[in-house]
Amino acid sequence: MNNLREISLLNKKILNNMTKFFITLLLFNLSIFSESINPRSITFINEKTEEYQLGLAVEILRESKSSTFEQVKLSDKFEESKQLIPNYGFTKDVFWVRFILENHSNKNEWYLFLSYPLLDKVEFYEKDKFTKNWKVQKVGDSYPFDKREFDDRGFVFPVNLEKNKKYIYYFKIESEGTMQFPIFVYSPKKFLVHREKEEFAFGSYYGILFVLVVYNLILLFMLKDIGYLYYLLYVINYGASQSILNGLAFQYLWPNLPYWANISLPCLGGFALFWGIQFTRNFLNTKKNTPLLDKFLIVLMVLMILLMISSFVFSYYLNIYFLASLVISFAIAIFSVSIVCWDRGYKPARYFIIAWVSLLFGVGIFSFKGLGILPTNLFTEYGLQVGSAVEMCLLSLGLAYKINLINLEKSKAERRASKYLEESQEAKLVSARMEVELLKSNIHPHFLLNSINATIVWLDEDPANAKKLLTALSEELHYILKLSNKKTIFISEEISICKRYLEIMSLRKDVKFSFKTEGISGKELIPPIALHTLVENGVTHGYPGRKSGEFILRKKTEGKKTRYILFNDGLPVESSRESSGTGIKYIKSRLEEAFSGRWEFYSKSAKNGWESCITIQT
């Protein structure tokens, strides 16, 4: 009996244990099946592939009000993702993402990578392999950057996947900005290669911006053109905005300022657009070329300022909508203004259009992606950086083209002014020469009549002197008629005219005049009748009551300057030789005509006589 009783107790214990085991197994299965896992959400990791994009292999639960994780695990409202990179635009809804990984490779170490860096709050749920409890990691730009376990601009979660086992993971994502969550699985080696390529691309992009800033900063100091300042402010703030979009600003510039990280994009984005519009107004001269559109651009600039102020007052959700709307308005306005200026014949506008088309295209795509109209992919995600780099390089070249065009127009204007001045000066010279020639037309007949009257008297009294007078008079008139219309003549010819004149005046005034030279070779060039005018002036005013007179012409060379000094020993009254006299005007006009800007002249009293000097620079 005792044995039967013991056997009966043992059977009861075994039955109780088996019952507990089956109940536990049933509850476990119910808990698994209660999560409504879709076989499509399983990603199989194999030996050959080291990168997986999970967009079409996840399930998504969208909630207007967040549920607890325990509630979400039991939810049957998860829906299959229909996008390679899920993108829901601007929304305040909470998104839960669920997916399963099954490792069929020999690699255990893998990285889950959520690559969009502007998400405010991300919670990653995984089950602890030892305790079987769910643990959570919280990251996002609402938390200080140093709270992340992995130092990366995106969100990286290392996971350990044992071979032939299934692992279920959850993400909870909240953000006031664009709601997109590109999720990847990488092997550590592949992730490193991916990061190197990305860093090289970003390094090239920001390197181009840095070179443009330095180059145009130098041009700003050299040319002092305000357009370069506007361009620099635009490039610097645009580059800062791009670093925010890429997550680099939060990683390197303000990692412990999550509040500023959340408002920096609308603030600096609005600042970049502000200077972009001001640069456009300056570059296209819209105030003159398109006054009406210029006022519209000013309105946009006011809105940009309001956006910057609003970023400190209102929620990021409202400001980012405001920014996206202004970006689209900015793109349309810039393109419209440049087309109008081009159509109205403003040449720099053509360069401007070519420069901005690439950026405007990228801006439009990026904005439509942010609004959820276009899907997120490599083209919509990074096309903006490529387009902006090309645009900034072309804008820099366009700015240089505009400056060159302005300088060319300025040079043409200066040439026109110079030509006008030259023509004006020529007209003055012609006028002076006409004045002198008119005076000579009155003087020569008087001089000729006096000489003829003297000859008539001498024909009876002194035929020999009369003959000499007529011969000298004939030779002088011959030389004057022959040479006076030339710009320059040999000084030997000018000396011959002077000697003939003195010969005539010696006979007429019964005064013995002489003309000597020192250092004169005879091949030097001088305007015609210049020295003759000085000699005539000296004879007329310097020898009243005198019986002799001497003229001496000396040549002195000092470097590139040659001086011709004419001295006479007459003693004239100084007021009779004013520098504003007609003869002096004639000499100056002929010197300017022959040696424009390369001559000097003076006539003044000297020791024991009068001295006149003509200086010519070779």
Image (cartoon, helix red, strand yellow):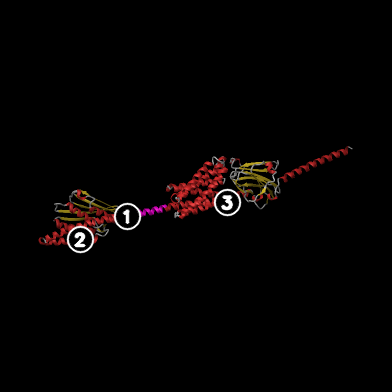
Q: Disc 3 marks which amino acid?
A: Thr
Quarter of the image where the N terminus is located: top right
Main SS class of the magenta portion in the image: helix
Q: Give 375 or 7, whichever is nearer the viewer.
A: 375
| Residue holding disc 1 | 422
Image coords of residue 399 (percent x, y): 46, 51
- State the extent of the magenta-drawn residues as a range: 406-425
Kind of element beneath mark 3:
helix
Q: Earlier in the sequence, mark 1 or mark 3?
A: 3
Q: Mark yes or no: residue 251 visible.
A: no
Query: Is residue 615 magenta-colored?
Result: no
Q: Earlier in the sequence, mark 2 or mark 1?
A: 1
Q: Residue furthest left?
A: 461
Kind of element beneath mark 1:
helix
Q: Disc 1 marks which amino acid?
A: Glu
| Residue holding disc 2 | 477
Quarter of the image where the C terminus is located: bottom left
Q: Give 342 or 479, whichever is nearer the viewer.
A: 342
Q: Residue at x 32, y 56 (%)?
A: 423
Q: Nearer the viewer, mark 2 or mark 1?
A: 1
Q: CA distance from mark 2 to mark 1?
A: 33 Å
Residue 380 disc label: 3
